[in-house]
Amino acid sequence: MVSPASHPEADAATLIRGAGLRVTDSRRAVVDALRAQPHSSADAVFQRVAASVPQTSLQSVYNALGDFADAGLVRRIEPAGRPGLFELRVDDNHHHLVCTGCGAVEDVDCSVGHAPCLTPSDAHGFAIHTAEVTYWGLCADCATTQTATPQTTPEQTTEAPEEGSP
């Protein structure tokens, strides 16, 4: 397969064919949209695709993204509490920074050389091939505009105690 990361100069048709898929105008437009804006939701991809291929439906964009993910052409990331996002950067075990303020997403490379994130304390018999790490925090813009109040990540919850409990 022709990987977008290893062949950034490859045109959309070459990438789609390299993934064993049929080339269509809307599929090419989906690849181009993800090149222009990595970490896009299906709705954001559709908005870009509709501008260049107006006859494309939202369902055809969802189908293309699903086919691309199944073929290994795109990677779907699912930051907790956010819509699923898609990117063309696959097969390199990179991770993501997600801003808890504005939702911006940035790539961050795994350690060079030995990938410690692929060596869990106990693999429970699994043959590990990928690790997904998401770093949560404030991007530089949000950090300068927000007050110094603590931020919560989607994994943290603050529930009020039940009535009558201490």
Image (cartoon, rainbow, N blue to C red):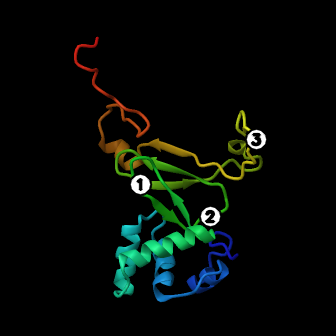
Q: Is residue 124 left or right of residue 161?
A: right
The quarter of the picture where the N terminus appears is bottom right
**Image spot of residue 82 (x, y percent):** 39, 52
Q: Earlier in the sequence, mark 3 or mark 1?
A: 1
Q: Residue at x 51, y 77 (%)?
A: 31
Cα distance between the residues tagged 2 and 3: 25 Å
Q: Give the label, 3 or 1, closer to the camera.
A: 3
Q: Amino acid at mark 2?
A: Val
Q: Nearer the viewer, residue 146 or 17?
A: 17
Up the image or down, 90 lies above or below 161; here it is below
Under circle 3, the secondary element is loop
Q: Identify the residue at image location x=47%, y=74%.
A: 63
Any part of residue 10 in sight: no
Q: Which residue is mark 2?
A: 90
Foreground mark, 2 or 1? 2
- Decide: marks 2, 3 in contact (CB < 8 A)? no
- Residue position marked by numbered label 3 in the rendering: 125
Can you tell which quarter of the image residue 138 is in?
top left
Q: Which mark is residue 104?
A: 1
Viewer-closest of 73 and 148: 73
42 left or right, relative to 106: left
Mark 3 vs mark 1, CA separation in Å: 35 Å
Q: Amino acid at mark 1?
A: Ala
Assess disc 2: are there few (<14), some (14-19) or many (≥20) residues with their C-alpha within 10 Å of its C-alpha.
Answer: some
Answer left or right for 72 relative to 54. Answer: right
